[in-house]
Image: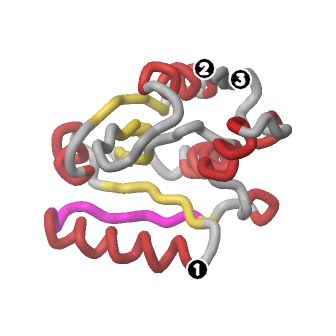
Amino acid sequence: MNRIAVFPGTFDPITVGHVDIITRASSMFDKIIIAVGENSQKKTLFTLADRIGWINFTFDKHPKIEIAAYEGLTVNFCKQVGANFLLRGLRNGSDFDYESHIAQLNKTLWKDIETVFIMCSPELGYISSSLVRDLIIHKGDFAQYLPNGVIPQL
């Protein structure tokens, strides 16, 4: 059986923190599907095409990594693509509190799903897409928080 993990998120935009988690997790799985979610409840700054394009650019040399867009429940997407693992990055205890509740709910929705948490590297613990979006909107220096070559335009 292949070990396939889904790493879901809106990636608005993808950050070096996301890249850190995905890169470190790639040795644990046969394949990681970066699942770019479209959430009607969440207003994104960048288009789905931009977000997927940046992720493709960032991971174009990584054969174990695929990118896909999805809508709806993450566990249903996991079933659809044959993934039994959800990959989640944690920055702090607040992330764990939030993510553990989602993991427990997902487990009740599908008993075969396992959530794997990876702590971000300590130097990246303060980075979030929402903070990077604020820097972009207010014309701050955001480049160090994004993967090389990702240059968002408003």
- Tell us which disc is closer to us: 1 or 2: 1
Q: Secondary structure at mark 3?
A: loop
Residue 30 at x, y = what percent? 43, 41
Q: Are marks 1 and 3 in contact (CB under 8 Å)?
A: no
The three-letter code of the residue at mark 3 reads: Ile
For the residues marked 1 and 2, what is the alpha-carbon distance in whole angstroms? 31 Å
The residue where tag 2 is placed is 57
Is residue 121 visible from the viewing direction of this image?
A: yes
Residue 150 vs 118, above or below: the answer is: above
- 37 or 35: which is nearer to us? 37
Query: Which residue is under mark 1?
Result: 93
Where does the C terminus fall, quadrant-wise?
top right
Give the vertical position of 59 relative to 18 (above or below).
above
Is residue 80 or residue 74 the one in the foreground? 74
Q: Nearer the viewer, mark 1 or mark 3?
A: 3
* Magenta region includes residue 114: yes
On residue 151, the disc is: 3
